[in-house]
Image (cartoon, grey):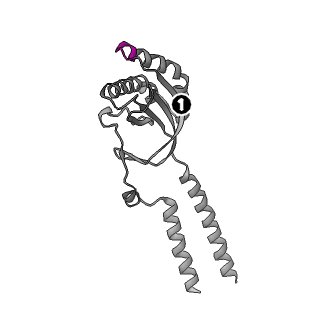
């Protein structure tokens, strides 16, 4: 009886540790996304979207590369929203393009995406959302913080992760390893009785 109580106490401790690990693994790393929407899919509107994108990336490159935390990046962008909007609008006006530009901080849902060797999981993230005109055209996005967008703008386009391959390509998490090992140990203990 003492042996079973000891085993039960050990398993409870292991389970408590595993739940703590699971809770920390569920917390996704903080990302700040950039989402730029074109007025329409017409060539001129798509070109203006890319012009605004390049401007935003140029304006934010240095400050966000220097940001030492997600919170610092969010704060910097939030404090400069109006300035970014005014400058983006002026940039488009210089080209004779009269569509309005809306710049805002929002939380948006994103699919899982692969940026080079980094998998960004599906989820809701803070976004610097820049809408040109009606925002009905194709959009463009990347990760502003950590600064993946600034590594190489030509390869900043994300490649969607195929849902069927996602499980196979990701290594087992610490929690999954724990669960698998925990189940095997329980089987061994109870089968030995």
Residue at 67 percent of width and 72 percent of height: 9
| Extreme residue toward the bottom, this view | 193
Is residue 94 inside the magenta stretch?
A: yes
Q: Quadrant of residue 151?
A: top left
Q: How many marks?
A: 1
Q: Which residue is rendered at x = 52% and y = 23% of the image?
A: 81
- Secondary structure of the residue carrying tag 1 is strand
Magenta stretch contains residue 184 = no
Q: Which residue is drawn at the image coordinates 48% and 64% (left, top)?
A: 177
When the figure is inspected, residue 39 is found, relative to residue 6, above or below; the finding is above
Of the pair 29 and 135, the residue shown nearer to us: 135
Range covered by the magenta-colored residues = 92-97
In the rendered view, tell whether residue 193 sits above or below residue 178: below
* Residue 137 as seen in the image, left or right of residue 12: left
Mark 1 Cα-neighbour bin, 10 Å: few <14, some 14–19, many ≥20: some
In x, y percent, where is residue 113?
Answer: 40, 46
Quadrant of the snapshot with the N terminus? bottom right
Could you tell me if residue 80 is visible in this image? no
> The C terminus lies in which quarter of the figure?
bottom right
Image position, residue 131 (x, y; %)? 46, 28
Q: Nearer the viewer, residue 10 or 167?
A: 167
Which residue occupies 52% across, 28% down?
104
Say if 102 sits above or below 112 in the image. Answer: above
Rendered location of residue 132, percent (x, y)? 43, 26
- In the image, is 121 to the left or to the right of 42? right
Residue under label 1, please give it: 105
Viewer can see residue 164: yes
The quarter of the picture where residue 143 lies is top left
């Amino acid at each position: 009886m003492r042996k079973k109580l000891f085993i039960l106490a050990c398993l409870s401790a292991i389970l408590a540790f595993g739940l703590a690990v699971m809770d920390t693994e569920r917390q996704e790393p903080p990302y700040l996304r950039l989402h730029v929407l074109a007025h329409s899919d017409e060539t001129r509107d798509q070109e203006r979207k890319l012009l605004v994108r390049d401007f935003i990336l140029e304006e934010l490159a240095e400050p966000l590369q220097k940001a030492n935390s997600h919170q610092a990046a969010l704060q910097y962008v939030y404090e400069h929203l109006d300035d970014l909007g005014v400058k983006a609008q002026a940039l488009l006006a210089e080209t004779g393009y009269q569509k309005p530009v809306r710049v805002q901080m929002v939380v948006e849902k994103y699919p899982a995406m692969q940026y080079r060797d980094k998998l960004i999981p599906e989820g809701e993230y803070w976004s610097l959302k820049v809408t040109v005109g009606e925002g009905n055209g194709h959009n463009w996005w990347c990760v502003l913080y950590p600064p993946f967008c600034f590594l190489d703008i030509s390869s900043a386009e994300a490649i969607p992760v195929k849902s069927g391959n996602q499980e196979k390509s990701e290594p087992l998490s610490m929690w999954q390893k724990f669960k698998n090992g925990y189940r095997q140990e329980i089987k061994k203990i109870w089968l030995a009785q």
